[in-house]
Amino acid sequence: MLALSMGCFTFVSTELMPVGVLPAMAEGLHVSLGAAGYLVTIFAFMVALTAAPLTSILAGFNRKALMAGLLAACCVGNLVTFLAPGYFVVFLGRILVAAAIGVFWSTAVVTAVHMVSSRHAVRATAIVFGGVSLAAVLGVPAGTMLGDLYNWRAVFAALSALSLLVFTLVVWSVPAVRISKAARRGAMSSVLKNGPLLAVFSITALVVTGNFLAYTYISPYLEQIAGQSPAQIGMLLLIYGAAGVVTNFAIGPFASSAPRTSLGLVTALFMLSLACLNSAAASTAALFIALAAWGAAYGALPVLLQTLVFREASRIPGAADAATSINVSVFNAAIGLGSLLGGMLINLAGPHPIPYLSACFGLAGLGAIFISRVKVSHASIKLIASSEEKRININVPGGSARGKR
């Protein structure tokens, strides 16, 4: 289980790492900040396009061999980025990793659930998705500090070495699990027609877009708007990361007992922290608080969203694989859209408006959560009323006959 979580950490750290070293990459590759940010955008869109179809095609493979091969691709892709002479070769290296990450992410979650009993499924999900959360809240800040000490290329060399280490762990510890490809194909259309799952995917799209609209360009924002030095930026991102680590592991019991309520509260915190970010930029202490609140909110989001996906998918036979791969596609499409919108906005107006637009996406996500709760409540009331009506008809003499008339 730890190897799967570390694999997700390695892949998602690779996906997001340009965020932490964006100014240095832009300068070293002789491109604008927006163009450097598109290394995240194109990566995310590539994952969104390939996650579901490639996961379906490769679903019948031995999971150990499949995930080891995907980690080998991650190692090579990071090595290409480290050695790249220019922007285009960096782009090619990242495309290679992007083609692998969606399959690994979907495969790791479902494999983890198959490795434990059904009552431990949420815990297994939280452990694997802990790697996803930790990549954003810990991996990127660590990469920022490493890049500040050495250079941005050293960060991708370290990621290549980490990929090789996790490759070894997967080969050593992950069982040779095989999961039927037929179940995924049969369930895909059912998932795409399921209202509650579509609602979760919509919430994922809105909140993750809002997060990465701001997070992709957090380094230039802190440098230009808040006047922070590279060392201070690394420390602020570490605070963001530490808060996210705490909530990633603390949210588990709440995700099991009240996932929708928890998601609403976390999304509200996310929205408020971004709405206050420009005001907080004038004070280092206030900036620490705002970034800690933002990190705490985002650290809990992937676990809550995936828990809801599994909860709704459990009502459809064989739907866990399909629902997870679609959620991965939506998640990464949202990363791409957020970084694309952020890149356009920073090129047009600079970093200052970015937190406000991010907060608007958070507000829209909060609205989607509220609407989905109302629909779930109405559906529950109808189900209870229908059950009660059937009970009365059964208990009253001739009730069933009258009901038919």
Image (cartoon, rainbow, N blue to C red):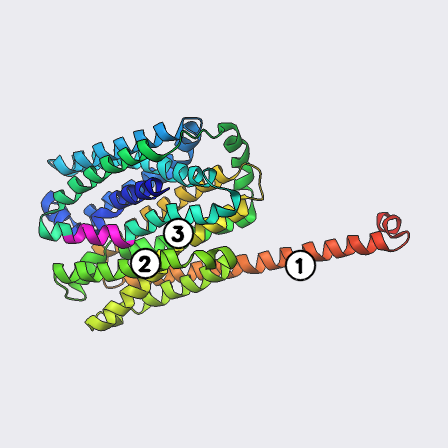
Relative vertical location of residue 34 with respect to residue 243 in this rendering, above or below: above
Q: Is residue 163 left or right of residue 56?
A: left
Element at badge 3? Answer: helix
Q: Amino acid at mark 1?
A: Ile
Q: Is residue 99 left or right of residue 55?
A: left
Residue at 52% in and 58% down:
257
Cα–Cα gap, marks 3 and 1: 29 Å
Can residue 145 be seen here? The reply is: yes
Relative vertical location of residue 285 with respect to residue 262 in this rendering, above or below: below
Relative vertical location of residue 76 with respect to residue 368 in this rendering, above or below: above
The numbered disc on residue 302 is: 3
The quadrant in which residue 10 appears is top left
Q: Is residue 139 magenta?
A: yes
Q: 2 and 277: which one is in front?
A: 2
Cα–Cα gap, marks 2 and 3: 11 Å
Tell me which segment is drawn in magenta: 137-145
Q: Amino acid at mark 3?
A: Pro
Which residue is the site of mark 2? 244
Relative vertical location of residue 65 with respect to residue 284 in this rendering, above or below: above
Looking at marks 2 and 3 on the same chain, the residue that comes earlier in the sequence is marked by 2
The numbered disc on residue 381 is: 1
The quadrant in which residue 362 appears is bottom left
Element at badge 2? Answer: helix
